[in-house]
Image: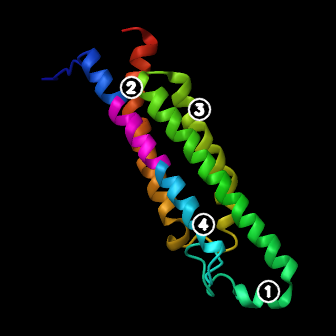
Amino acid sequence: MATTTVMQPETKTDAASRLHVGGATMAAAAIGFIGYAVIFFIRNFTDSFLELGISANEVSVGKNEIIEFSPSLFHYIGHLHIAVAGFIAATGVAVAALAWFGVRRGLMWAWVAAVAAPVLALAVALPAHYPNNFDTLGHLGLVYLATAIFVVGALIALPALLHERDGR
């Protein structure tokens, strides 16, 4: 004998709860992106210099050797660190705002924009890590964690957004 499961329509309270939890989770993950950017920025000005999780196993020289080889190259790399940190932080701020103020209000366009921004950033940035062995857990682990949390939040909110869009 076959059984049939009937899905109950999502109530307004369920939808509001999903939007609140999903949007807040997405925003929390975006704050994690900002935190990663702050670490990235600070390391540029310390003896570590290289990014979090990048060591002599991945790059055969450190800050002093780079300065000794070429002070102008050192300053160029530093400027790239600062710029990348700024773009990561800016993306985190934009995504957090979209999630907190848009997704939680049931705005599908805000969800699409909040998802598109980190997807684009990761699609551009991540592939260069793998062929150069820069894909260490110490380097990308926090990004992977924040991304996983973000995806969970986006998936929590999506059914409620689709419910809102369909006018049910």
The residue identified by callout 3 is 113
The residue identified by callout 4 is 40
Residue 151 seen: no
> In the drawing, does residue 138 fall left or right of residue 163?
right
Whichever of callouts 1 and 4 sits on the residue coming sooner in the sequence is 4
User: In this view, which residue lies farthest toward the left?
Assistant: 1
Q: Position of residue 63 (x, y in %)?
A: 71, 85
Residue 29, magenta (yes or no): yes
What SS does tag 3 mark?
helix
* Distance Cα–Cα, label 2 vs label 4: 35 Å
* Distance Cα–Cα, label 1 vs label 3: 41 Å
Q: Position of residue 160 (x, y in %)?
A: 37, 23
Label 2 crowd (10 A; few <14 / some 14-19 / many >=20): some
Q: Which mark is residue 67?
A: 1
* Distance Cα–Cα, label 1 vs label 4: 19 Å
Quarter where residue 100 is shown:
top left
Residue 158 seen: yes
The residue identified by callout 2 is 159
Q: Amino acid at mark 4?
A: Phe
